[in-house]
Image (cartoon, coloured by chain):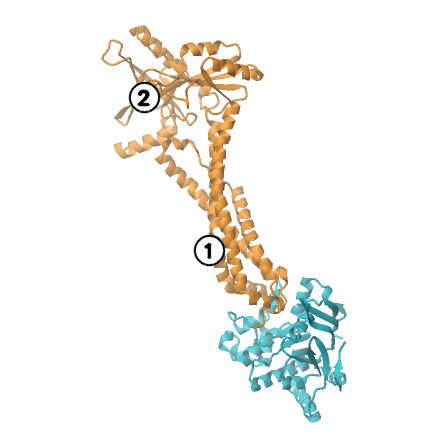
Amino acid sequence: MKGFLYKLFFYFKHNSVNILRSFVSGLGILFLIAFFVMYLAVKSAVLSYISGSLLDNLASDEIKILPKNAKAVEYVKREGSPGISQELYSKIKSMPDFKATSTISRTPFSIRLKGEILGKSRSTFVPVCGVDRNLIKDKVPRWQSFYNKKPVPIIVPKFTIDLMNNYMSSMENLPSLSEKDLIGFPVELKFHAGKRNTPFYKEYFFDGEVHSFTDLLNFPGVIVPTDFLAEVTAQYRRETGGQAALDYAVVYARVKDPDKLPVIVSNLKSMGLKVESQKDIAEKTQKTMGLINEVFFAIMAVFLVVSIISIFNSYLAIVYIRSERFSLQRILGFPKISILSAFILESAAVGAVYGAGGYFIGNYLLSHGGEILSKWVPMLSAVHLEKAGADILFWSVLFASAVCVIAAAIPGIFASNINLFKAVRK
Amino acid sequence: MLLSVENVSLFFGKRKILDNVSLKISEGEIVAITGKSGSGKTSLLGIMSGLLDPDEGVVYYKGENIIKWWDFKKSRYRNKEIGFVFQFFNLLPDLSAYENIVYPSLVKFFPTDLKGEVRELSKILGIEHILYQKPETLSGGERQRVAIARAIINRPKILLADEPTGNLDTGTALEIKNLFLRLRDEFNMSLIIVTHDEPLIEIADRHYHLEDGILTEKIIKRPQRENKTKRTASVKKTKSLDKKPQAKAGSKSSASRKTADKKIK
């Protein structure tokens, strides 16, 4: 044991410079693994975002119907923005091919939301859209209670919690509130209906409460039941005789027979509508993932190549500088495998350290970077970058070690096959 | 027979370095090999140690053909059975004398603690006061003693010395010569010395000359009386220093001496 400890001490004492050189040359591995960890997190975040998103998660028998010229779903009705009219929706709904339909609806009125905390109230215009209860089935907590009732249930995007807390702490000096604290929070909805300063202008007030928070819609506003919006619109028409109609940003329809999908799509297109099926969504998802893959793989490939060349060069330099030592080692009876294994063990150890280091740096960037990103762009808070697990640590260490060993193996083979007798002759 | 080189030929490209060389070495025997630069002396040492494989012929160590051995066994053979001493010492400059000496023992995964062994050897070689110095601070003679200590730390059966006094002054060369005699006498070690140094040739039991790859045995010219007294004195001195089994080689070596030049084929 004493001899073995001496050997270890001897090795570290006389190879510390080599080890240091290997560490410097292998620095790229650190970034490679950090990027690898981040790539995995981003990939999984994007996939889970897409699969969890209300708009981009279709069943095999489901289609998404949009207005003809819509490039994306427009949740708020603006002048000239395309939408599906109520008449057109009625036609779609009455088609015999569908077993169920649900919608995301838009109101023609602007809406102000008023809230009060600790005696301080704030009122602001917010975009509002309506959804049917069956659209959020099993996707939002307590979805069963989301229907037109008093007080009106309101679903709020999760990122608004950050916005609200930031505002309250900086402007009003109020404490931060959690999602749980805010469930059931009372608000007032004020509808500004019709054109101001005309006989058709009318204001409606409704009590509402926060029903839940969600990331399902990539929408910077609040969600109310569609039938509530329909009721307000009808009441306005009744009371003023003004022309105001609810329309739809998107209609989801479940077909009875998925084999008939091509015919149904063709029929809907002939009605001036745009249709997306699961296949289209899959293609879109694939395209997004392809882009993410390309960017990350390009970065990782650069780090990989640079690291391998750098480690290879560094070990080759060690072989050149120490050729006499290797030759002498062979003469003194060190077998080839002993010299080669020294290279392999050393590079594997360097790789393992960098693998673990890259993993922790990647995770650190994910947690801190994710937080910063969601503060800068609150809407991206819906994309959850989760830290890599312990299994990824294992694979990172293994991968980094393998890369270092591959890069060091060829110089190691040179060293173990060095010109034995001549190198020690001057 | 400890080591036997039989009909060995070696080519470097089209150039024939060794031409059908044969040589036998017994335990406790000293063999001197002379020859011009580039005559193949070092290559012959390389073949005997398993560092080079000949193109023709065989090398037997204790009856086993070492050419057929795998690298691992050859390395073990070099580590345990062979010691090397070079003209330019070939000590590792960043290691202390002590570290240089124990270096061959580090081949083992679990090396034995050699502190006592090094202390004993350094006493015999007179280097105990310089054990923790770096080679650059040592004189030529001290460096060669350290190199000899490194060569014999594993108590090899054969010591291969490639011009060991070629880089030393006459006085130091004489000390090395006496050391070699003591190694033979104390450890019953066989020595194969490539040299041009007359005093070293004089202590050899046999002298070979290598020219154009051909090995021929030569007469060793030395006064009969001086030869006898030298050997006796060396053995007496050894007894007082070390109680290990003494050499049995004396009679054998004189019997093997040849009287005329003989071409070895």
Locate residue A242, reporting x and y percent.
30, 8
Locate residue B93, reporting x and y percent.
51, 71
Indicate which label's residue lies in the foreground, 2 or 1.
Answer: 1
Q: What residue sits right under mark 2 in the picture?
A: A187
Q: Secondary structure at mark 2?
A: strand
Chain seen in cyan: B
Q: Is residue B73 left or right of residue A94?
A: right
| Picture quadrant where residue A220 is located | top left
Q: Secondary structure at mark 1?
A: helix
- Mark 1, Cα crowd under 10 Å, few <14 / some 14-19 / many 20+, is some
Locate residue A280, reporting x and y percent.
50, 24
Chain seen in orange: A
- Mark 2, Cα crowd under 10 Å, few <14 / some 14-19 / many 20+, is many
Q: Amino acid at mark 2?
A: Val
Q: Is residue A60 left or right of residue A229?
A: right
Above or below, A390 relative to B194: above
Q: Which mark is residue A24?
A: 1
Residue placed most toward the observer, A291 or A363: A291
Q: Which mark is residue A41?
A: none
In the rendered image, the quadrant that contains the N terminus of chain B is bottom right
What is the spatial separation of the Cα atoms under label 2 and label 1, in whole angstroms? Answer: 59 Å
